[in-house]
């Protein structure tokens, strides 16, 4: 654990070193989960921006933001799980 606060520019180095200490398989899955989250977010932004089937208009009427949160959260989980699944299924066996 850190004994003193880090300078703002050192956080990136610290997090990179912590990430590299993780086991190889955990890093592999985390990286693919990150890309799945990214693609899920881009997908939902596109659906809202282009107002596909009136989803953007419906979400604009929601004052609490719960519907938008749930749409983002579920899409990110789905795309992240798919990205991890595809990555694992495409692994080759060592011969």
Image (cartoon, rainbow, N blue to C red):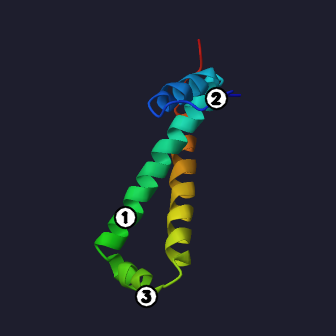
The earlier-in-sequence mark between 1 and 3 is 1
Q: Residue at the top extreme?
A: 95
Q: Quadrant of residue 88?
A: top right
At 51% from the left and 77% from the top, the residue drawn is: 65
Q: How many marks?
A: 3
Residue 59 placement, left or right of 14: left
Residue 46, percent across and down? 33, 65
Badge nearest the viewer, 2 or 1: 2
Above or below: residue 7 compared with residue 70? above
Instruction: Using the image as rendered, state which of residue 50 and residue 6 is in the foreground.
Output: 6
User: Mark on residue 89?
Assistant: none
Measure the alpha-carbon separation of dots 2 and 1.
39 Å
Task: Name the quarter where the N terminus is drawn.
Answer: top right
At 49% from the left and 73% from the top, the residue drawn is: 68
Measure the alpha-carbon separation of dots 3 and 2.
46 Å
The earlier-in-sequence mark between 3 and 2 is 2
Q: Which residue is mark 2?
A: 4
Above or below: residue 28 compared with residue 77? above
Above or below: residue 24 compared with residue 51? above
Q: Which residue is mark 1?
A: 45
Mark 1 crowd level (few <14, some 14–19, many ≥20, 10 Å Cα)? some
Question: Do labels 3 and 2 touch, CB within 8 Å?
Answer: no
Q: Which residue is mark 3?
A: 61
The earlier-in-sequence mark between 2 and 1 is 2
Residue 32, percent across and down? 51, 39
Badge nearest the viewer, 1 or 3: 3
Measure the alpha-carbon separation of dots 1 and 3.
16 Å
At 59% from the left and 20% from the top, the residue drawn is: 93
Q: Determine the secondary structure under disc 3.
A: helix
Q: Determine the secondary structure under disc 1.
A: helix
Instruction: Using the image as rendered, state which of residue 86 and residue 1 is in the foreground.
Output: 1
Above or below: residue 36 compared with residue 59? above
């Amino acid at each position: 654990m850190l004994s003193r606060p880090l300078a703002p520019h050192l956080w990136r180095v610290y997090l990179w070193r912590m990430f590299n200490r993780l086991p190889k398989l955990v890093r592999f899955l985390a990286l693919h989960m990150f890309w799945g989250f990214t693609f899920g977010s881009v997908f939902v932004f596109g659906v809202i921006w282009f107002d596909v089937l009136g989803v953007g208009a419906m979400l604009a009427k929601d004052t609490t933001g719960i519907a938008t949160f749930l749409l983002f959260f579920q899409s990110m989980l789905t795309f992240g799980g798919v990205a991890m699944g595809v990555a694992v299924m495409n692994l080759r066996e060592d011969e």
